[in-house]
Amino acid sequence: MNSIYESMSQAELLVCDFLKSKRIFWTYEQPVFLSDDNNRPRIFCPDFYLPELGIYIEVIGNPNLNDYERRENIYEKNNIAIIFITPFNNKSWERDLLNEINEIHNRRYEKLKRINRCY
């Protein structure tokens, strides 16, 4: 039987090992239903989903191969928290990933504070 690790790219394996080292639970290629830039229904499968944090991660192995900016805009339009990282082109990707996770949760916390002020 094949392991999911066998289907991962080298960049995805780096991220996988980092998430494990931080004891962050993840699922691989968890489908997400959304509307694309033309409002057509689509299913995307980002590389990782962190269910305890409600955040997706897309690993960019080669930024020249895919239309990542378009996808990032689609996720934003659908209000889906996703982090795009490039482990091979960014030496501080681990710190940047943790910073992005914190930023997402800080924005969520600010929304909760605003909602609670209404009561």
Image (cartoon, rainbow, N blue to C red):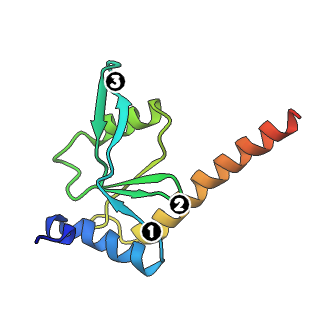
Q: In this view, does 97 lie above or below 72?
A: below
Q: Could you say whether the residue bearing mark 1 is in a helix, strand or loop?
A: loop
Q: Residues within 10 Å of mark 1 (few under 14, many from 20)?
A: some
Left or right of 41? Residue 82 is right
Q: Residues within 10 Å of mark 2 (few under 14, many from 20)?
A: few
Q: Residue furthest left?
A: 1
Residue at x 71% of width, y 41% of height: 111
- The residue where tag 3 is placed is 37
In the picture, the disc for residue 41 is none
- The residue where tag 1 is placed is 25
* Cβ atoms under marks 2 and 1 closer than 8 Å: yes
Residue at x 25% of width, y 71% of height: 13
Q: In front here: 58 or 94?
A: 58
* Eye-nearest disc, 2 or 3: 2
Work out whether mark 2 precedes mark 1 in sequence or the reverse, and give the earlier one: 1
- The residue where tag 2 is placed is 52
Left or right of 110? Residue 99 is left
* Eye-nearest disc, 1 or 3: 1
User: Residue 116: percent from the left, percent from the top?
Assistant: 83, 40
Q: How far apart are marks 2 and 1 (CA)?
A: 7 Å
Q: Could you say whether the residue bearing mark 3 is in a helix, strand or loop?
A: loop
How many numbered badges does the structure rendering display?
3
Work out whether mark 1 precedes mark 3 in sequence or the reverse, and give the earlier one: 1
User: Residue 66: percent from the left, percent from the top?
Assistant: 20, 43
Residue at x 33% of width, y 71% of height: 16
Q: Quadrant of residue 92?
A: bottom left
* Quadrant occupied by the C terminus: top right
Q: Distance between the residues labelled 2 and 3?
A: 28 Å
Q: Residue furthest front?
A: 1
